[in-house]
Image (cartoon, rainbow, N blue to C red):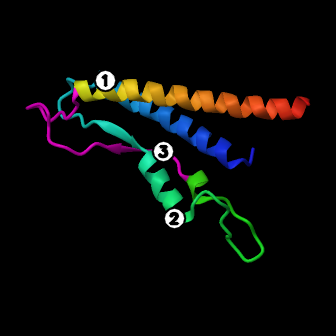
């Protein structure tokens, strides 16, 4: 499907799934000496891409139409920087991870709702 809103929702869902894995890994390794927490970078990169090109089409060559740079943004796992929370070099803050987990669940649910609306409207158009 070559629809910008569909691609953005799909990329957001990919980011949410990746974030769920990172948070789960952080929680599982809360007591592992030297473990550094992971986080997913997506929304900040998406904002940058939207700021550069907007959500319209981008021309890649004189006779070509391209896609918005926002559709090409994909999630990336990075090591969370910060001071060690424990004397063993581990920087996982369990309270912060639980907040991130709850926020990611809300984010995922909102994206699923948007995807359902998108697919429902497409189904309506196809069937009418």
Q: Nearer the viewer, residue 88 or 70?
A: 70
Q: Residue at x 35, y 39 (%)?
A: 39
Q: What is the C-alpha distance between the residues marked 3 and 1?
A: 20 Å
Whether the magenta-drawn stretch holds residue 23 is answered as no
Residue that mark 1 sits on = 98
Work out which quarter of the rendered image holds the C terminus and state it: top right
Q: Which residue in the protein does label 2 denote?
A: 52
**10 Å neighbourhood of mark 1: few (<14), some, or many (≥20)?**
some
Would residue 17 appear left or right of 102 to someone viewing this image?
A: right
Disc 2 packing (10 Å; few <14; some 14–19; many ≥20)? few
Q: Secondary structure at mark 1?
A: helix
- Out of 5 and 38, give the one closest to the viewer: 5
Please name which of the two marks, 3 or 2, marks the residue nearer to the observer. 2
Q: Mark 3, mark 1: which one is toward the viewer?
A: 1
On the image, the x and y values in percent for residue 98 come to: 31, 23
Q: Which residues are magenta?
A: 73-93
Along the polypeptide, which appears first: circle 3 or circle 2? Answer: 2
Front residue of 37/57: it is 57
Q: Is residue 43 left or right of residue 14?
A: left
Is 80 one of the magenta-colored residues? yes
Dot placed on the residue nearer the N-terminal end, 1 or 2: 2
Above or below residue 45? Residue 85 is above
Q: Quadrant of residue 65?
A: bottom right
Mark 3 sits on what residue?
A: 75
């Amino acid at each position: 499907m070559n629809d910008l809103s569909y691609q953005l929702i799909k990329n957001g869902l990919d980011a949410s799934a990746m974030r769920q894995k990172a948070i789960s890994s952080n929680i599982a390794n809360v007591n592992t000496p030297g473990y550094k927490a992971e986080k997913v970078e997506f929304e900040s990169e998406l904002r940058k891409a939207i700021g550069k090109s907007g959500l319209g089409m981008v021309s890649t060559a004189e006779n070509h139409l391209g896609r918005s740079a926002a559709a090409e943004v994909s999630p990336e796992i990075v090591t969370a920087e910060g001071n060690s929370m424990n004397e063993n070099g581990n920087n996982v803050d369990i309270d912060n991870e639980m907040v991130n987990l709850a926020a990611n669940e809300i984010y995922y649910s909102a994206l699923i709702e948007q995807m359902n609306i998108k697919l429902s409207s497409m189904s309506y158009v196809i069937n009418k």
